[in-house]
Image (cartoon, grey):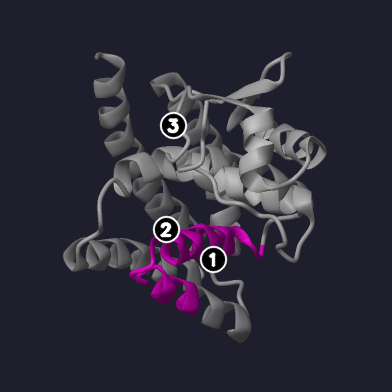
Amino acid sequence: MTIEPQVRSVAGANASAVDLVTAEVRRAVLTGALAPGENFSIRDLADQLGVSHIPIREALRRLESQGLIILRQARSASVAPLSSADLAAIYRLRYVVELPLAGASAGKRGPDEVARLEALLERTRNPEPEIAWQAHYDFHEALVHPAANEWDDRILHTIWMAAERYTHLVFDPTPITEAERARRYETHKVLLDAALADDPKSMERLLREHLAANEEKIRTHIDALEQR
């Protein structure tokens, strides 16, 4: 299979080959350029990215640990499929891990951290999709940052990366209108205001409502796909 339209060469870029391959394949999976269930050969991937098989395999092992890629015994891999059961497990973990950390972080930020949260929220309105989505990811990370330790970060990054596939599928299928961009900004502004107030229960409640609304929209979409 030729996968040239899906991934971009990373040859000559100024970073470790494994990190670059990981980032590019992750981008292709999250945006749907590499579709759920799609098979691809490691040789083709190495050719298209302009690197050897060694960083490809290491990058794919990383992505497999995040639930994005399935490695085969032969020299091939596939993109992990999407399912309503997978979605339910991801959000169940988000409620268990993310909510109490966000609550414990409420009202516990210094001026620099407040400024960063505000800047990230503004960046979510950027018309460039990759910038806006990265800001969205970083915003949710910043909501739990004051209370999260190293293990919390590891677990949450894995959960968030798995959730991103579903989020992109439903919320980023076409160019986003200004009205939709404003709506998303306002829903996250509510979370920002809660994060700055010293009210853990309110922060947890609002974040749960936010996640639950997204989960429901995604579930409706995935259920329709599974019934085809």
Residue 202, numbered circle: 2
Would you place residue 7 above or below residue 138 in this image?
A: above
Secondary structure under tag 3 reads: loop
Report which quarter residue 40 is drawn in.
top right
Start-end of magenta stretch: 118-146
Identified by mark 1, the residue type is: Ala
Residue carrying label 1: 106
Identified by mark 3, the residue type is: Ala
Would you place residue 156 above or below residue 116 in this image?
A: above
Counting residues from the N terminus, which is met first, the one under dot 1 or under dot 2? 1
Q: Are marks 3 and 1 in contact (CB under 8 Å)?
A: no
Q: Are marks 1 and 2 in contact (CB under 8 Å)?
A: yes
76 vs 120, nearest the viewer: 76
Q: Are marks 2 and 3 in contact (CB under 8 Å)?
A: no
Would you place residue 220 above or below residue 28 in this image?
A: above
Magenta stretch contains residue 167: no
Q: Residues within 10 Å of mark 1 (few under 14, many from 20)?
A: many
Name the outermost residue toward the left: 179
The location of residue 14, given as percent across then percent down, is 75, 66
Residue carrying label 3: 35
Counting residues from the N terminus, which is met first, the one under dot 3 or under dot 1? 3
Identified by mark 2, the residue type is: Ser
Assign the magenta stretch its main secondary structure. Answer: helix
Secondary structure under tag 2 reads: helix
The residue that appears at 78% across and 35% down in the rendered structure is 53
The residue that appears at 38% across and 67% down in the rendered structure is 128
Counting residues from the N terminus, which is met first, the one under dot 2 or under dot 3? 3
Report which quarter residue 226 is drawn in.
top left
